[in-house]
């Protein structure tokens, strides 16, 4: 049995006059014990998707199950089994760390002691601050507290909506390590993020854009789907370089990427041709080299294809 | 049950940690009672008046002396002609001028008939009424004394008794009113805010995605405010008995029981507002317009309901404060028992249940 299934889920917002189609027929399945990533920019529909799966919103169309239970009919059962960490910090800022933990443990009919083993690793890091108000914690610590609260009842499926947004790089790394260990405990994790580099940490990812799924695969699989050669180009005047690249016939797409411009070529074997073309345009300190595509390249490529 | 207690504890923490709001909630009844009791009184006391005396004889001076000696009036100045009257009123300090025509004593003694004119500044009609009434009463008294030894052919002697409030103290009517107002404010407004705040802070999202039932959330939110209101009821009653000398003539238990009933009604209304709005601002606005204003206007506390046009009289029936105000006045001032207020009590209880059921029904189990 799949931990999560979605079948043609649609969701619209707004009145008759102006409707926003947040989700346009989303379907996918998540296996038990998998870390499944929903990757997409802001406004792609990630939060709507999470709210439907956590029974907080009703889909306009389609069906979805969590742990085999229907998100509309069996919402009460689902609410007992899943853990949910919304995108916005949603704990009580005027309660202390310990009070928040105790409160959520009790609300889920359990106690900190009962499932201490599961949250120990995370919670032990914030336990020294258990008498501090949650509102006075740093971003990373808030995140750990929120995760501890979402985990305290040992959920079978964990929903994390942009858990690393606004968290520093070190804490983000730690956070993903924790997710890996939770997966070992058999917990299915659905996590969304706008950061493409985090996609590599998931078992499988769905690339979402404007309410539709562009691709579902393992991170390596997604990169394998990217078959065009990719070049990284650098010169002194990057703005002119980009303009010239866009005029070049052999390219499918060019865009700034860090200190380089990435150029997606239409076919193989054009590297020298491109270099000659650019040298004719008198670019100083020109550098052209092959690049390995990342998830972000795949995302941009898929997005342009649509 | 453990869930419920944990939730109540959480609410208590919220209230307790927001010290400023808590002190406002607890201090408000005390301040209101004191303001209404000492500052905002419509009783007339040492009101400044002026005299225009054209006769300056025995009778007029002794009457003036008598008026000045009463605790209602203080002779502030003496005028010399009619034109001064308006000038004085424009100054704003003097509200009443007593005019004696020439030969007051003479007409009184020889023609058995004398005139006194009371000129009042009626820009405040109630005050003008009260002042002329008091002054007239003093003059009547004076007349009675000089006619004592004579036999008049026909006399009707009116004797007035002010039952339940012989001294006509304002406190007797505003203590029940302030009670209704304070409970309304604390219970309705604060509970209206409390659920909406969870929506605004995003915590509602987690609560909804958890197994706790809406009924528990709603009732747990009401409990701490009920306790807070009990403290307020106690402080209002203590202040009115020991500072304002308003007696509790009826049963204290009945009074407290009725207050709790009214508190619950307000809480239910606040919860209803709370579960049907999405922002704290709307919640505050609705509770002010929907509850606070009708409480002041239509409960009979400020303006007598009997004098209102029929539509307003009908509307006033749905204002819980009206019934509570009636009950408190009856129990506290008249000292009646439950037998006399059972109807009002039932109406309040009905309103409370109705509001509570609707607010639980209206509580959204999802975000939209």
Image (cartoon, rainbow, N blue to C red):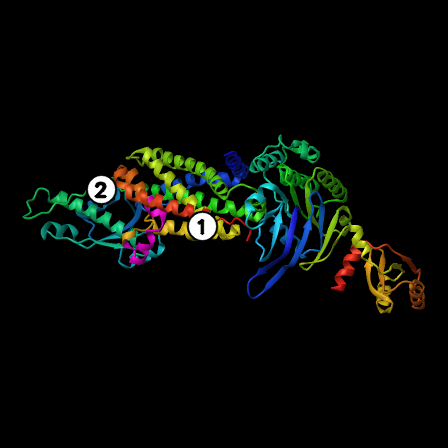
Q: Distance between the residues labelled 2 and 1?
A: 37 Å
Which range of residues does the magenta coloring cover? Answer: B307-324
- Same-chain status of marks 2 and 1: yes
Count the labels in the image. Answer: 2
Neighbourhood count class around disc 1 (C-alpha, 10 Å): few under 14, some 14–19, many 20 upward: many
Which comes sooner in the sequence, label 2 or label 1? 2
Viewer-side residue, B254 vs B113: B254
- Residue B87 horizontal side relative to residue A29, left or right: left
* Quadrant housing residue B228: top left
Is residue A301 magenta-colored? no
The tag on residue B162 is 2
In the structure shown, which secondary structural element does the residue marked by tag 2 occupy?
loop
> Magenta stretch: dominant SS?
helix
Residue B46 position, x and y percent, is 31, 44
Viewer-side residue, B196 vs A18: A18
- Chain identity of mark 1: B
Residue B86 in view of the camera: yes
Residue B45 in view of the camera: no
State the residue position of label 1.
Answer: B287
Viewer-side residue, A282 vs A153: A153
Is residue B309 magenta-colored? yes
Residue A184 position, x and y percent, is 73, 38
Residue A221 position, x and y percent, is 79, 52
The residue at the point 59 percent across, 60 percent down is A12
């Amino acid at each position: 049995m799949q931990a999560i299934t979605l079948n043609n889920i649609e969701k619209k917002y707004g009145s008759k006059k102006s409707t926003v189609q947040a989700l346009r027929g989303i379907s996918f399945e998540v296996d038990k014990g998998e870390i499944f990533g929903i990757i997409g920019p802001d406004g792609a529909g990630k939060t709507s998707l999470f709210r439907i799966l956590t029974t907080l919103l009703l889909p306009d169309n389609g069906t979805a199950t969590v742990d085999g239970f229907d998100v509309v009919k069996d919402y009460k059962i689902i609410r007992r089994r899943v853990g949910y960490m919304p995108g916005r910090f949603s704990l009580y800022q005027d309660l202390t760390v310990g009070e928040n933990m105790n409160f959520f443990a009790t609300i889920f009919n359990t106690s900190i002691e009962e499932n201490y083993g599961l949250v120990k690793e995370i919670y032990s890091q914030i336990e020294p601050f258990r008498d501090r108000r949650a509102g006075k914690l740093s971003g990373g610590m808030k995140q750990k507290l929120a995760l501890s609260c979402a985990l305290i009842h040992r959920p079978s499926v964990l929903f994390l909506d942009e858990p690393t947004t606004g968290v520093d790089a070190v804490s983000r790394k730690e956070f993903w390590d924790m997710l890996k260990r939770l997966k070992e405990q058999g917990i299915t994790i659905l996590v969304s993020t706008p950061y493409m580099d985090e996609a590599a940490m998931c078992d499988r990812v769905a690339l979402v854009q404007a309410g539709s799924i562009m691709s579902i695969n393992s991170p390596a699989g997604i990169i394998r789907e990217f078959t065009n050669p990719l070049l990284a180009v650098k010169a002194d005047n990057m703005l002119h370089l980009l303009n010239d690249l866009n005029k070049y016939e052999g390219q499918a797409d060019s865009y700034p990427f860090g200190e380089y411009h990435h150029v997606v070529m239409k076919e193989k074997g054009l590297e020298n041709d491109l270099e000659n073309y650019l040298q004719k345009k008198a670019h100083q300190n020109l550098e052209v080299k092959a690049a390995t595509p990342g998830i972000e390249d795949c995302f941009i490529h898929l997005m342009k294809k649509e | 049950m453990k869930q419920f207690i944990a939730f109540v504890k959480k609410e208590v923490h919220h209230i307790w940690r927001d010290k400023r709001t808590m002190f406002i909630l607890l201090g408000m009844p005390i301040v209101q009672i004191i303001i209404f009791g000492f500052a905002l009184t419509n009783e007339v006391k040492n009101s400044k008046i002026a005299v225009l005396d054209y006769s300056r004889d025995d009778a007029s001076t002794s009457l003036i002396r008598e008026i000045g000696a009463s605790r209602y009036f203080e002779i502030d100045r003496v005028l010399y002609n009619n034109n001064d009257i308006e000038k004085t009123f424009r100054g704003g300090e003097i509200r009443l001028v007593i005019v004696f025509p020439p030969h007051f004593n003479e007409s009184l003694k020889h023609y058995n008939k004398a005139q006194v004119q009371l000129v009042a500044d009626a820009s405040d009609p109630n005050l003008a009424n009260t002042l002329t009434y008091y002054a007239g009463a003093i003059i009547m008294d004076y007349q009675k004394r000089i006619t004592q030894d004579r036999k008049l052919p026909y006399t009707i002697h009116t004797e007035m008794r002010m039952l339940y409030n012989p001294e006509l103290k304002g406190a007797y009517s505003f203590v029940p009113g302030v009670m209704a107002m304070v409970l309304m404010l604390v219970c309705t407004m604060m509970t209206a805010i409390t659920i909406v705040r969870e929506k605004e802070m995003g915590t509602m999202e987690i609560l909804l995605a958890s197994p706790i039932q809406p009924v528990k959330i709603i009732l747990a939110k009401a409990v701490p405010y009920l306790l807070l209101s009990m403290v307020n009821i106690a402080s209002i009653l203590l202040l009115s008995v020991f500072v304002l000398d308003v007696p509790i003539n009826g049963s204290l238990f009945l009074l407290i029981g009725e207050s709790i009933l009214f508190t619950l009604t307000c809480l239910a209304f606040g919860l209803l507002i709370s579960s049907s709005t999405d922002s704290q601002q709307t919640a505050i606005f609705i509770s002010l317009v929907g509850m606070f204003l009708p409480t002041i206007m239509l409960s009979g506390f400020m303006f007598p309901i009997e004098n209102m046009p029929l539509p307003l009289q009908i509307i006033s029936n749905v204002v819980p404060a009206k019934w509570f105000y009636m009950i408190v006045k009856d129990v506290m001032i008249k000292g009646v028992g439950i037998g006399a207020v059972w109807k009002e009590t039932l109406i309040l209880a009905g309103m409370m249940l109705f509001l509570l059921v609707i607010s639980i029904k209206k509580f959204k189990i999802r975000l939209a």
